[in-house]
Image (cartoon, rainbow, N blue to C red):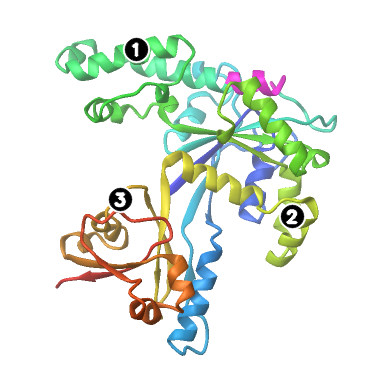
Amino acid sequence: MLGIGIVGLPNVGKSTLFNALLKKQQALAANYPFATIEPNIGVVAVPDERLTKLAEITSKEEKMASLPPIKPATVEFVDIAGLVKGASEGAGLGNKFLSHIREVSVIAHVVRSFEDDNVIKEGAVDPKSDFETIRTELQIADLQTLQNLNEKALRTDPVKKSVVEKLKAVLNEGKNAFEIKLSEEESISIKELSLLTAKKEIVVLNISEGDYNPESIANIVSKYSDLLKIDGEKLVVICAKIESDLASLSEDEQKEYLKSLGIDKSGLERLIQKAYLELGLISFLTAGVKEVRAWTIKKGFTASLASGEIHTDFMKKFIKAEAVSFENFVEYGGWKGAREKGKARLEGRDYIVNDGDIIEFKIGT
């Protein structure tokens, strides 16, 4: 399962955002440092409007009295305790905070970009300094991990030793491990280290309600892309307060509220989309009377590997995959129509799955 770790300095809006994402108050959003001691973990559905359409088509095609169960892909959000300067040396919650980050797939840095006299700015200075503080602590923690490696053991593994030296040099320059291009062999040699700065990252800019409109958001992305020296594609602009308001509304009411702001997607949707993009993830779909479901896989997965997401035995017993694009499935009213029009293809185990492919696997006994 995709895991997104929400990190940042205390009182930047992490727990408020987390509560909104889960649509219930699972985290203690209090106005003081370390309101979150243990990481709060919540699993949320990945918004995917294609599933409802597939369920409607399947119900009609199979002459069902109701829609089949809909099972979206899921994402695990981890609300990690607020970081403070010196965490890598034990300040604040120190290594406890850092160890929780090792478990997630991608790091979402929440940076506060609004003023509120009612909220304590514990350790926070400004968005640029706050972001650099987080990055620096992660880099220092990784340097300590590398320095603690057994030198004698490294001498017996020249590949790992070479990579470790490269990493030390990059980290000492204030850069991240993910900025180094490594071969597959080199990547495998250091996988066990679970380096914090090797993880993909997204920056979540928490802005005020007054700035939450398309024009302001575009200007903010441009401004902070230059200020933080990161690709604008890695930035997600949200307003935790508005996301919190959305959490109490029905789906239709949420759409209307967002429409009134000139925004087509919630912060949750945009954050998940960014995470999928950063990690190179896509979804394939299955549709039948038992369920309509989305499955998360790596972009470039073959049909054989994709079948293993449903059940590991499927990879061994794989025969064929019948695939049809979402657009053709909808246009021709389901499997029968797609087959009649020649749009459902029988593919072998090496077929590269596309995002939105609807697949029915043919599995042997």
Image location of residue 221, percent across then percent down: 67, 32
Q: How crowded is mark 2: few (under 14 residues within 10 Å), some or many (20 or more)?
A: some
Question: Where on the picture, by quarter, is residue 103?
Answer: top left
Image location of residue 107, percent across then percent down: 51, 35
| Highlighted magenta segment, given as a residue range | 123-133
**What element does badge 3 sit on?**
loop
* Residue furthest to the front: 341
Pick the quarter of the image with the C terminus. bottom left
- Residue drawn at (76%, 39%), measured in percent from left and top? 215
| Residue behind mark 2 | 258
Count of numbered labels shown in the rendering: 3
Is residue 55 at least partly visible in the picture? yes
Q: In this view, does 74 lie to the left or right of 268?
A: left
Is residue 11 at least partly visible in the picture? no
Is-magenta flag for residue 42? no
Which of pointers 2 and 3 lies earlier in the amino acid sequence?
Answer: 2
- Residue drawn at (47%, 67%), measured in percent from left and top? 327
Image location of residue 314, percent across then percent down: 22, 63
Q: Is residue 43 left or right of residue 25?
A: left
Question: Where on the picture, by quarter, is residue 22?
Answer: bottom right
- Viewer-side label of 1, 2: 2
**What element does badge 1 sit on?**
helix
The residue under label 3 is which amino acid type? Answer: Phe
Contact check, label 3 and label 1, Cβ < 8 Å: no
| Residue behind mark 3 | 301
The residue under label 2 is which amino acid type? Answer: Leu
Q: Which of the pair 293/89 is nearer the observer?
A: 293
Which of pointers 3 and 1 lies earlier in the amino acid sequence?
Answer: 1
